[in-house]
Amino acid sequence: MSTSLLYHAFGIINYFYQSTCYIADAIIVAVKDDRWRPGCPVCRNRNVSCREKVTRRFRTIPVGQETVYIDLPVQRVECIRCHVVRQVKVRFADERKGYTRAFGRLVLELSRHMTILVPARYLGVSWDLVKGNPKS
Ligand SMILES: [Zn+2]
């Protein structure tokens, strides 16, 4: 896999491909943020103090029958201006979501053509994720 494939297949841009591993029925793709200097997620101030990184796992669109996850170490920062300590924004997923925007769009598209249960079973997610998709 390459950084180019991340963009074209999963809609992930401005992240570097790191590695791929295969566990049971899942493909796990590790990526890395290309920002060398993160900013405050609240006020966008560049004067931040970096804390630890927390690896988050995001569900993304499947490849064939295989479930695909994106692993991303997300930097936590403390803003010098507004004193907030938060994770930097993930550009391919909405806040507090465990799936990518591409996955959300796939769920939305499938739910337009069938009942909520069918895409939920096909994708192996709960029906309330399909129902709760904000754009559906
Ligand atoms: Zn700030």
Image (cartoon, helix red, strand yellow):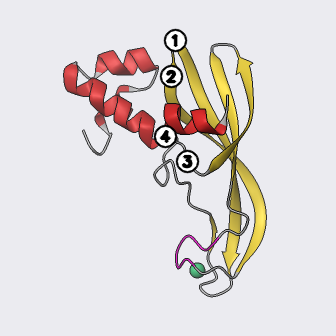
Secondary structure type for disc 4: loop
Q: Position of residue 122 (x, y in %)?
A: 40, 15
Question: Which mark sits nearer the N-terminus, 2 or 4?
Answer: 4
Crowd tier of the residue under label 4, counting other residues whose Cα lies within 10 Å: few below 14, some 14–19, many 20 or above = some
Vertical relation: 37 (above or below) 70: below
Q: Position of residue 62 (x, y in %)?
A: 51, 22
Foreground: disc 2 or disc 4: 4
Magenta residues (range): 39-44
Crowd tier of the residue under label 3, counting other residues whose Cα lies within 10 Å: few below 14, some 14–19, many 20 or above = some
The answer for how far apart the CA atoms under marks 4 and 3 are is: 6 Å
- Looking at the image, residue 52 sits to the left or right of residue 63; the answer is right
Disc 4 designates what residue?
11
The answer for how far apart the CA atoms under marks 4 and 1 are is: 19 Å
Tell me if label 4 and label 3 are in contact, CB under 8 Å.
yes
Amino acid type, label 4: Gly
Q: Residue 106 in magenta?
A: no
Amino acid type, label 3: Ile
Amino acid type, label 1: Gln
Disc 3 designates what residue?
13
Question: Which mark sits nearer the N-terminus, 3 or 2?
Answer: 3
| Point 52% across, 54% down: residue | 91
